[in-house]
Amino acid sequence: MPMNMNEATLLWADEYSRMAETYDRVAAPRFEPIARTVLELADPKPNELVLDVATGTGLLACLLAPRVLPQTVVAIDLADGALTVASYRAGRAGIRNIRFEMMDARNIVYRSGLFDAVVSNLGIPNLGYDRTFYEIRRLLKPGGRVVFSEWDATPPEGQAAFYELLEKYATRTPSPELARIREARALNRSDPDARALRHPPRVREKLEAAGFASVQVVSKTFPVSFAGPQDLVAFVGAWGWDERELEEMPSDARRAFDAELSERLRPRMGPGGLVEGFPIHVYVARTPSL
């Protein structure tokens, strides 16, 4: 039977869980400037109750928590491995006012009108996010706000080269696990709503349809540094699914992949390495006031 939306979402969560420690070390620090932008636009106040949707390894939740004391931040994610790493992150930082819970962003089990604000940093699910928007609208108090970041449809140059070469050199005899990942990826690529999440006018339409009274979009390109091509490869592989592709790539193909990627990126290498521009849209929307 063909894979459905729920199966694909659970598979992504499993892969993210598998790589959570690597992701927290390799990827999360590069997303901190984006998270801080979300935080400043959300402008949390002391004692406000805030929900962090798809918290991942807890980057945004840990930045948020000191701002809402003595209140507790609620941080949810579907990937249990990521939540474990998030709990360690908070513990190491001495943060005690975050409640991490394993929960689907499309079915958030809290009562309506509970939260002052909802935030998310690159975490809105690609598949079924209409339900996430309706859930967020339901959970917010009148006049409450949601602030979240998302990628633009045009990927950074280095990542675009990575995926082009991955398609060229990927194994033609994938394991059952990798075959399922490819099926999930194909479902995501073919879903019109998943593609729409990368386009601000379409996201605005979805938010307004969910009942938000005002929607603003802040678009910005964040510069992110990499020591070289292999540092970029490690970053892209940190979510899990691309790491499986690289692991199963035949050794001769992997050598050719690395060589061609290095050659493609060479003109963009400077004294400090490679600088990628991450094109990001940050959405700010509010519920109607009473």
Image: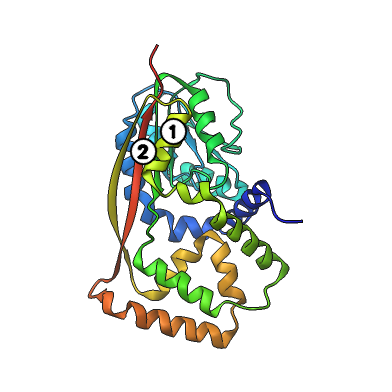
Asked whether disc 2 touches disc 1, contact meaning CB atoms under 8 Å apart, the reply is: yes
| x and y percentages locating residue 117 in the rendered image | 42, 27
* Above or below, 191 relative to 235: above
Which residue is outermost to the top?
290
Q: Which of 117 and 95 is in front in this view?
A: 117
Q: Determine the secondary structure under disc 2.
A: strand
The residue positioned 31% from the left and 39% from the top of the image is 217
Label for residue 269?
none
Nearer-N-terminus badge (2/1): 1
Label for residue 207?
1
Task: For marks 2 and 1, give the CA distance.
Answer: 10 Å
| x and y percentages locating residue 64 in the rendered image | 39, 35
Q: Which amino acid does label 2 sit on?
A: Tyr
| x and y percentages locating residue 236 in the rendered image | 46, 64
- Image quadrant assignment for residue 253: bottom right
Relative horizontal placement of residue 38, taking residue 55 as reference (left or right): left
Residue of label 2: 283
